[in-house]
Amino acid sequence: MSTLLEVSDLNKSYVTKRNVLGRPTRTLHAVKNVSFSLQRGETVGIVGETGAGKSTVGRLVLRLIEPDSGRVVFDGQDLLELGHKDLRSLRQRAQMIFQDPFSSLDPRMVIRDAVGEPFTVHQGLRGEERDTRVLELLERVGMRADQLDRYPREFSGGQLQRIAIARALTTEPDFIVCDEPVAALDVSIQAQVLNLLVDLQQERGLGYLFISHDLSLVRFLAHHVVVMYMGEVVEAGPTEQLFSDPQHPYTQKLISAIPSPRPSRQRRSAVSPAKEA
Ligand SMILES: Nc1ncnc2c1ncn2[C@@H]1O[C@H](COP(=O)(O)OP(=O)(O)OP(=O)(O)O)[C@@H](O)[C@H]1O
Ligand SMILES: [Mg+2]
């Protein structure tokens, strides 16, 4: 396996208050000295409670926001040294899917165009040629040809997430940041979307940074886990090791708080297929 992403000593503060002159008077150190690496084709899970800095890390590694300090090396390239043009090509190789797929799709665009747009922008494809590629991808994620001319509002959350995944795949990425991709979905739908992500990973050798507050999902999906607490990585390691022998008290607390699968059969059925896949 080769390293796809290497993150070292990332720091990010947000200004939370300014004085009348616009000078920062209060800042929040949201990400503190975060380091981890991700191998090609592997899933790294980031867990931690709300406000831990998970999404901030996800945005930093795609350089959607700028860090205060630290390094992000993607496939051997230092991201923070990339010029405009190289950043554009990075944007094709590294994609993001979000918790709320509706907000990531333009409500006025039928899905033929939503998924087709990146084909036009990056590859200059139009017309029938473009449609063929769009349909290929949509069918791969479980959608049908007769749904091409529908608007986002005509789909369920799970369908929208499939469409968002198809759109992310148009540029043939090798890395996707998945920020709570199933948190907004019905438990019964979660497993289908997770299975799709796992299948796509196997087919395409995708690396995932899988951000979730749901430890049971991370346990089934991730090869390595990074535990964040108040902006810091408190523990990281191979998934089974981390779950069977957590070292840090915070990790132990998180794991002991996982609801037992028995009373909630639904949750169990939601995650177990992902393990089998
Ligand atoms: N643009 C911003 N401006 C100011 N503060 C922010 C901004 N974005 C995030 N924060 C703060 O930074 C901290 C980390 O936020 P972040 O969204 O990364 O956490 P998270 O782990 O993803 O949480 P959640 O599980 O709720 O999604 C939080 O305290 C949050 O309020
Ligand atoms: Mg978040």
Image (cartoon, rainbow, N blue to C red):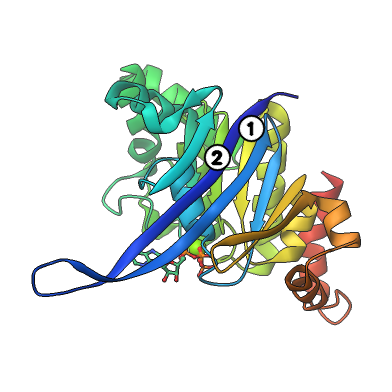
In which quarter of the view is residue 247 placed?
bottom right
Q: Amino acid at mark 2?
A: Ile
Q: Residue furthest left?
A: 21
In the rendered image, the vertical position of residue 110 relative to residue 117, given as above or below: below
Specify whether 191 is left or right of 93: right
Q: Residue at x 56, y 69 (%)?
A: 230
Q: Is label 1 in a helix, a strand or a loop?
A: loop
Q: Residue at x 26, y 51 (%)?
A: 108
Mark 2–mark 1 CB contact (< 8 Å): yes
Dot label at residue 90: none
Specify whether 203 is left or right of 159: right
In which quarter of the view is residue 2 placed?
top right
- Quadrant location of the N terminus in the rendered image: top right
In the picture of the structure, the residue carrying the numbered disc 2 is 176
The quadrant of the rendered image in which ligand 1 is seen is bottom left
In this orientation, does residue 163 appear? no
Q: Residue at x 36, y 18 (%)?
A: 123
In the rendered image, the vertical position of residue 17 relative to residue 85, given as above or below: below
The residue lying toward the viewer, choosing from 143 and 224, is: 224
The residue lying toward the viewer, choosing from 22 and 121, is: 22
The residue lying toward the viewer, choosing from 209 and 274, is: 209
* Label 2 CB less than 8 angstroms from ligand 2: no
Q: Position of residue 172 (x, y in %)?
A: 52, 25
Q: Amino acid at mark 1?
A: Leu
Specify whether 112 is left or right of 9: left
Between disc 2 and disc 1, whose residue precedes?
A: 2
Q: Position of residue 40 (x, y in %)?
A: 67, 29
- Quadrant location of the C terminus in the rendered image: top right
Q: Is label 2 in a helix, a strand or a loop?
A: strand
In the picture of the structure, the residue carrying the numbered disc 1 is 206
Label 2 and label 1: CA atoms lie apart by 7 Å
Q: Position of residue 250 (x, y in %)?
A: 73, 72
